[in-house]
Image (spheres, rainbow, N blue to C red):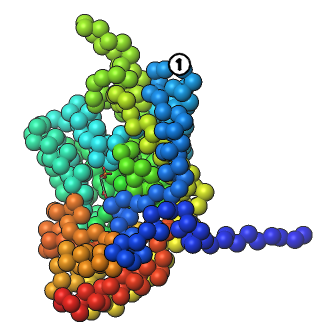
Amino acid sequence: MSMSLSIPKPLDIAAIRQEFPILHREVKGRPLIYLDNAATSQKPKQVIEALVNYYSKQNANIHRGIHSLAEEATAAFELTRDAVQSFIGAGFREEIIFTKGTTESINLVAYTWGRKNIQSGDEIIISTMEHHSNIVPWQILCEEKNAVLKIIPISDEGELLLEEYEKLLGPRTRLVSLVHVSNALGTVNPVRQITEMAHRIGALVLVDGAQSAVHLDIRVQDLDCDFFAFSAHKLYGPTGVGVLYGRKELLEAMPPFQGGGEMIKEVRFTKTTFNELPYKFEAGTPNIGDVIAFRSAIEFIETTGKEKIRRYEQELLHYAHQELEKVPGLAIVGRAREKVSVVSFVIDGAHPQDIGILLDNRGIALRTGHHCAQPLMDRLGITGTSRASFAVYNTLHEIDELVKGLQRVVKMLA
Ligand SMILES: Cc1ncc(COP(=O)(O)O)c(C=O)c1O
């Protein structure tokens, strides 16, 4: 009997780069090297074409029309919901709520579930490494309800201190709202374990998946989280679209977020009844074109292969760590054992903003500053970092160019 071994083909990065028109432009007379993917990723042709196709051929308001365009646009919009359901492994399509981004998804939970369920003296747990969008909504809620916000500390390497987390859990804990992957450090948090510990004492868990959805295989039912929030624009999709996944029974029990068209069943001056899921949380005309184009981004990831992307990005991460450490005076910030392809660093005597400007002169785009994580910067005793974050279209050569650029920066500044 003959056995055929199927060896997975590596990714053809040159061919993938061809799919991203923006990668062929120049900045300051040099080929663009885009290393700011944690802020937003670039878009492949199929996403751009889906947007053009929608506005050229299908544009209509959805759900309410009976004419052909409205029906086509509605069908395309709802197909994205199915694609998202399968992309994150949700049990039901009505558990997928479209928002305008992670920020709005988290605020939705704070304003609806939070206002209904949080009472004076209740406790909400977040961590030191949260993005501002997973801090401020809870601060506002806690202030309004006289509730208490507790913070999981981290190690110097940028990992959560789980034994400290355990001590924070108590009879008044109602919610643990935690970043899956830190945008500033790249740390991957052990969400499954954190969820298990929270559920043991009856608290719910919201996962901020803004940075994880593009790098990790997300199965919300395996993570066993109650809510999961992410943004399309960080996974090769358009801006202005986000997702809130919530367990059906929780979403059903939550009051609506915004009032208006689409979220109602019947409106009378005497009494208004609300629509069923998911529409109860989608008041007004949604971002139809971008939601439709988002499906093409998911298709891009799925046809490229998430596991192949993950492996390639890990190669970029390890190479970047190895090469950046050769730059004199450079220290990597964030040395968790499990990381995605995000590398933050500081250089002795060089301000991150100056580093950013000098690299931009060489066509290299990276992010500098506090990365919307000021409490994390305070904990680390710095005001900011420079951050290179890699996507599937980045190359080892681009990392070499970054290192060369930094070596020049050191000569000029440090
Ligand atoms: C970890 C994390 N959470 C939340 C957000 C907010 O995402 P958005 O601005 O798309 O709402 C970001 C964006 O950078 C992020 O990195």
Q: Is residue 73 left or right of residue 179?
A: right
Regarding residue 29, the answer to whether it shows in the image is: yes
* Local secondary structure at mark 1: loop
Regarding residue 363, the answer to whether it shows in the image is: no
**Residue labelled 1 has its Cβ within 8 Å of some atom of ligand 1:** no
Q: Amino acid at mark 1?
A: Ile
Q: Is residue 299 left or right of residue 132?
A: right
Figure check: 313 above or below 276: below
Task: Name the one closer to the observer, 213 or 5.
Answer: 213
Q: Quadrant of the N terminus?
A: bottom right
Residue plotted at (43% across, 60% down):
42
Q: Is residue 320 left or right of residue 331?
A: right
Q: Badge 1: how crowded within 10 Å, few (<14), some, or many (20+)?
A: few
Which residue is outermost to the front? 29
Residue plotted at (26% across, 84% down):
331
Relative image position of residue 49 (x, y in whole percent): 53, 49
Residue at the disc numbered 1: 66
Relative image position of residue 210 (x, y in whole percent): 36, 54
Quarter occupied by residue 251: top left
Task: Name the one closer to the observer, 39 or 58.
Answer: 58
Residue plotted at (57% across, 24% down):
68
Relative image position of residue 177 (x, y in whole percent): 28, 50
Figure check: 153 above or below 86: below
Figure check: 27 above or below 203: below
